[in-house]
Image: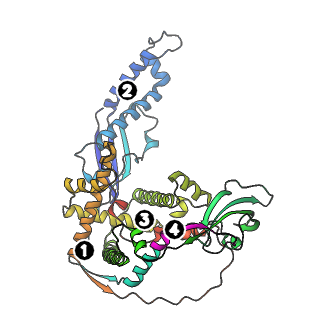
């Protein structure tokens, strides 16, 4: 079907596509469909396929016109947006998210007038890149206590290599690892099976314990059963605790044997400490780069005017929620579906996780688009050799799924180009360290006993509120 098209700018991130089909062109397609229907239909008073088109039209004309329009408009839209020559400024973020602007005017389809279809959609926003070279940026100095960090890392390795052994003939205490059954009932004695747990393992006073029963378990002995009444969200609940196991950590002795247990290359404890000190110094150097870069990106965000489409904000939110659930699943050694189901039971959903984060999500998208613009302006690219080298380091190096490999390559391309862009910005700008502002004294306030049962899950683990230069693939909006 022949048509004409016209693109119109509504704002810097929204376009209107107007498609016009003349009544003559539409009539041609309509007549073809009408004849095809007449050949297939059985209408009272006529043998199958012998009814005149005029009769078919009188009975089904409006329906057939709508079908012809829908079939053809879908083909036209696909043809327009699949054209490689389409101006990048007119390309939609996602061609599946198109809105018919004048649907009420179009339907029912009329046969005696031109069809004018108006479609609005989001595009990648037009904006002017900020001055990204030759800037002098202030950043907050990063505190670095190498001695303390080295000791913290050694303590972590000692804890990680601890032996877990049964605690015999003693009561449970803070820091012990306990296994228990938790039977949750409502105030009428009906068990809440979705909240109950069997063989539930956690460390007493560990912040990930959602039932907040740590204090109640302290002092219990193996095989002891205890019932605790609690009010959660103004609902009285009964928790029957059956303590099955109590275990403790036995920390290893800090010597050369321990160092070799950590890594075979560590022949002595001194060698291990030197290598850890080197890793900590390198980590600090990277942290320093990240802080400088974040200060620069914050400045870019302040001076760059941009209409950020809601579509990209929503996509960023979806990405961050998926990443959070994946991390949660990994920490709990479960799968994604189980983790999401558990979080939902704790009244922790994507909506609650992203609540109040719209501005932050918008800022992340904004910075990502600025970085993409700088990458293009400076013609920064990842070579095939660089991508192949990174692929070799990944777990997908021998994967035979070609479609998956192409996707991984595109991700690696974004990561490599992102790192090159970061290095370019750090090299082309100067940075001045400023002392952090002294911490304000906070008056102690009385706290109430009423706190959400899932407070640890909802407030301790909400990285959306944390501003740090994310990897390019995290916020990259692929065109």
Q: Nearer the viewer, mark 1 or mark 3?
A: 1
Task: Find residue 71 and report its image quarter.
Answer: top left
Which badge, 2 or 1, comes first in the chain's sequence? 2
Task: Find residue 136 and report its image quarter.
Answer: bottom left
Query: In what element is the residue under mark 2?
Result: helix
In this figure, which residue is indicated by the disc labeled 2? 30
Q: Residues within 10 Å of mark 1 (few under 14, many from 20)?
A: some
In this figure, which residue is indicated by the disc labeled 4? 461
Q: Residues at badges 2 and 4 in contact (C-beta under 8 Å)?
A: no
Which badge, 4 or 1, comes first in the chain's sequence? 1
| Residue drawn at the location 47% of the way across and 68% of the way down | 463
Q: Which residues are magenta?
A: 157-172
In this figure, which residue is indicated by the disc labeled 1? 426
Which badge, 2 or 4, comes first in the chain's sequence? 2
| Residue drawn at the location 39% of the way across and 58% of the way down | 312
Residue 115: image location, x then y, percent: 36, 37
In this figure, which residue is indicated by the disc labeled 3? 361
Which badge, 1 or 3, comes first in the chain's sequence? 3
Q: Residues at badges 4 and 1 in contact (C-beta under 8 Å)?
A: no
């Amino acid at each position: 079907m022949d048509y004409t098209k016209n693109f119109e700018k509504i704002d810097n991130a929204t376009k209107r596509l107007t498609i016009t089909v003349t009544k003559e062109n539409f009539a041609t397609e309509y007549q073809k469909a009408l004849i095809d229907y007449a050949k297939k239909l059985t209408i009272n008073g006529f043998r199958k396929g012998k009814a005149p088109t005029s009769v078919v039209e009188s009975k089904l004309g409006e329906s057939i016109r709508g079908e012809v329009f829908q079939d053809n408009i879908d083909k036209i839209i696909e043809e327009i947006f699949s054209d490689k020559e389409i101006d990048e400024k007119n390309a939609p973020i996602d061609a599946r998210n198109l809105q018919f602007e004048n649907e009420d005017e179009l339907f029912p389809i009329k046969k005696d007038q031109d069809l004018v279809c108006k479609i609005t959609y989001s595009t990648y926003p037009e904006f002017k890149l900020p001055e990204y070279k030759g800037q002098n940026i202030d950043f907050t100095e990063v505190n670095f206590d190498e001695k303390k960090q080295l000791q913290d890392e050694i303590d972590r390795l000692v804890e990680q290599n601890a032996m877990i052994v049964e605690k015999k003939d003693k009561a449970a205490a803070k820091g012990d690892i306990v296994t228990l059954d938790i039977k949750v009932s409502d105030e009428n004695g009906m068990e809440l099976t979705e909240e109950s747990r069997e063989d539930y393992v956690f460390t007493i006073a560990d912040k990930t314990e959602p039932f907040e029963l740590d204090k109640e378990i302290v002092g219990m002995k193996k095989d002891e059963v205890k019932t605790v009444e609690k009010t959660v969200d103004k609902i009285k609940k009964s928790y029957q605790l059956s303590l099955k196991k109590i275990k403790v950590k036995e920390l290893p002795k800090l010597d050369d044997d321990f160092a070799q247990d950590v890594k075979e290359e560590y022949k002595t404890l001194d060698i291990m400490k030197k290598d850890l000190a080197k890793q900590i110094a390198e980590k600090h150097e990277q942290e320093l780069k990240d802080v400088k870069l974040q200060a620069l990106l914050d400045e870019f965000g302040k001076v760059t005017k941009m209409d950020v489409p809601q579509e990209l904000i929503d996509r960023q939110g979806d990405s961050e929620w998926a990443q959070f659930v994946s991390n949660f699943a990994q920490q709990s050694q479960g799968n994604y579906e189980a983790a999401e189901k558990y979080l939902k039971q704790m009244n922790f959903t994507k909506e609650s996780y992203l609540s109040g984060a719209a501005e932050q999500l918008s800022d992340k998208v904004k910075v990502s688009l600025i970085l993409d613009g700088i990458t293009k302006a400076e013609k920064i690219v990842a070579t095939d050799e660089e991508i192949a080298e990174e692929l070799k380091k990944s777990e997908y190096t021998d994967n035979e799924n070609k479609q998956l490999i192409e996707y991984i390559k595109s991700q690696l391309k974004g990561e490599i180009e992102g790192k090159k862009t970061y290095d370019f910005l750090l090299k082309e700008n100067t940075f001045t360290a400023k002392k952090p502002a002294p911490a304000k004294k906070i008056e102690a306030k009385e706290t109430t006993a009423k706190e959400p049962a899932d407070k640890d899950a909802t407030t301790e683990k909400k990285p959306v509120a944390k501003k740090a230069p994310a990897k390019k693939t995290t916020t990259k909006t692929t065109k």
